[in-house]
Image: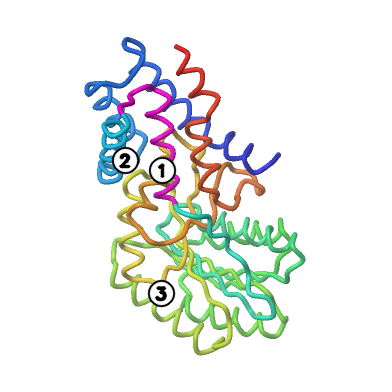
Amino acid sequence: MGLFDKFKQGMTKTRDFLMHQVEAITASLGFFDEEELDDLEMTLIQADLGAATTDKLMENLRSQMKSQGKKSTEFVLKTLKESMVDILGENQTFELVPGKLNIILMVGVNGTGKTTTSGKLALRYKKQGKKVLLCAADTFRAAAIEQLEVWAERTDTPLISSHTGADPAAVVYDSIQSAKARDTDVLIIDTAGRLHNKKNLMDELGKIERIIRREAPDAAIESFLVLDATSGQNAIVQTHTFTDIANVTGLIITKLDGNAKGGIAVAVADQSSLPIYFAGLGEGAEDLVDFDSKYFVDSLLPDEALAELAKQ
């Protein structure tokens, strides 16, 4: 299955919701008047594009309709698609730095899919022939350690871990020493995500980052924030929170197939200057894919569906 097909399959719920709503909105007139635009605005908010991003999209849409004197369904949706692609920006594919130890710090709240995504990244790089090491630095949850153990076994990847309640920074220290001894290409560190006490989380992540920079000063270091698409607007709050307390360099949005609110990817891109590197489009190990702005938007509002609407 090609990348576009994966996006199309993964975004089915959001696409079906949007197309059904648009069809209902245009059923009476067959084009967009002010009342229909208001309904479209509500539809975008319901798809989790968020009020601020929706305002931006609708303002541009109304401006384009006025300047070009067009209000057909096809024109409205194509203009909307172009605006979404503009917000998402150019694709920024994440690449490992050859000849160096690449350290990927996985951050985010509990339940976003951090641990599973760590395992999927390990599999991805193993398939590329890289030497990969996993580190279970979420020592506050026994389940997180056990889950990463399963992924380590499944992907035949060595894992550095400790007992529940151990110092996460100490586990990270051990993993770096092991990575250097094994001539590792990629060290993936799964961290805890307890937001009920931001100061503790900030202190913990700060300590981990200091250990990494001290013990691996020449490493290529990335911090990926993992966001759960099904959490809706909380994903935007989490983005603001973690960029304040951690040196986040990129985003991974998981569970885009989970409900009809995949528009959160556009809202997050609009509210953050961080690139979206990966998208989780299913539960399978192969369902973590490089994020592609055009494929994503084309999966939400496919051209063939727009053409059918235009005929009605």
Disc 3 is placed on an element classified as helix
Q: Relative to 181, say whether 93 is above or below.
A: above
Q: Is residue 79 magenta?
A: yes
In-front residue for pair 213/114 = 213
Task: State the quadrant of the C terminus.
Answer: top left
Cα–Cα gap, marks 3 and 1: 33 Å
Label 3 neighbourhood size at 10 Å, few (<14), some (14-19), many (20+)? many
Q: Nearer the viewer, residue 243 or 184?
A: 243
Three-letter code, disc 2? Leu
| Residue at image point 44% right, 24% down | 19
Specify the amino acid type for callout 3. Leu
Q: Find residue 106 and report its horizontal and vertical position in percent.
A: 50, 65
Residue drawn at point x = 56 percent, y = 37 percent? 10
Amino acid on which the number 1 mark rests in the picture = Met
- N-terminal-most mark, 2 or 3: 2
Magenta span: predominant SS is helix
Callouts 2 and 1 close, C-beta under 8 Å: yes
Can you identify the residue that label 2 sits on? 57
In the rendering, at what x and y percent does residue 87 appear?
Answer: 39, 49
Instruction: Tell me the mark number nearer the camera, choosing from 3 and 1.
Output: 1
- The magenta stretch spans residue 268: no
Question: Is 272 placed above or below 48 here?
Answer: below
